[in-house]
Amino acid sequence: MNLIEQRTACPVTRVQTIISGKWKILILWHLKQGTQRFGSLQRLLPGISNGILTRQLRELEQDGMLLRKVYREIPIKVEYSLTDTGLSFLPILDAMATWSMSHMSESKQ
Amino acid sequence: MNLIEQRTACPVTRVQTIISGKWKILILWHLKQGTQRFGSLQRLLPGISNGILTRQLRELEQDGMLLRKVYREIPIKVEYSLTDTGLSFLPILDAMATWSMSHMSESKQ
DNA sequence: CGGGATCCCTTGAGATACTG
DNA sequence: CAGTATCTCAAGGGATCCCG
């Protein structure tokens, strides 16, 4: 039991692991509006390739943040939506956005 | 004006840029307790090398999250503390920790 | 349409040795 | 004590092609 937790000992580190990935936060942000299809997500993310988008979605799914629903039609349709866990993370995203806009004056260079 | 913002168009992306880095969130988390010296931070972070710690601290400083104060003594002493911007980010860290602990049941494998 | 597979290439982490 | 400089290495991003 204590061996399992050693990888993710610190709660805050666990979050960092989940959202680490160039597009993940942005993906969650866009799913805030509701269900999105693969193609629509790709259109919302400027310049992401399908391979990368697939990987980030899979990882978010494995971390329990979103749900993948496949419609076996021709052509195929796949919808992504937030799970309850993902939904409960939204306030944090909102807080991030609010915080960020209050500190736009800072610059990295 | 609009050209400047294009790099960090989305507020949430800006946050992602700032906290991207294996140790950054953890560093902020430990500075929550108050001022820390370089060595004490290194001791708080299990297995980080001095080179990495230096780089993450420098980036956080450039992003306006923390303050670096040098005491020109022998031997030298350097103290790190959160800026107002960094302090205002703490509630988000707390929210992350709380959220994380409410969803410990999810696993990545 | 929504991927999977593959390859390349950049980024960043980590180790080690050295310095004011 | 708190770095700097340099190197190596693994991970992750990105492009392209192909497929059910």
Image (cartoon, coloured by chain):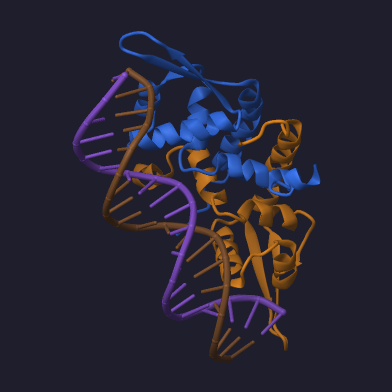
Chain colours: A orange, B blue, C purple, D brown
Residue A96 or residue A43, whichever sits in front: A43
The vertical placement of D6 against B72, above or below, is below
Question: Horizontal placement of A97 versus B76: left or right?
Answer: right
User: Is B66 on the left or on the right of A25, as rendered?
Assistant: left
Percent coordinates x, y for residue A22 in the rendering: 58, 54
The residue sitting at 75% across, 31% down in the picture is A102
- Comparing B77 with A60, the one in front is B77
Give the quarter of the image for residue B63.
top right
Which quadrant is home to the N terminus of chain B? top right
Q: Position of residue D11 (x, y in %)?
A: 42, 57
| x and y, in percent, of residue A53 in the image | 61, 66
Q: Residue at x 49, y 41 (%)?
A: A13
Residue situated in front as seen by the camera: A85 or B93: B93
Q: Residue at x 36, y 36 (%)?
A: B51
Residue at image position (54%, 50%) is: A20
Q: Quadrant of residue B97?
A: top right
Q: Position of residue A75 (x, y in %)?
A: 72, 86
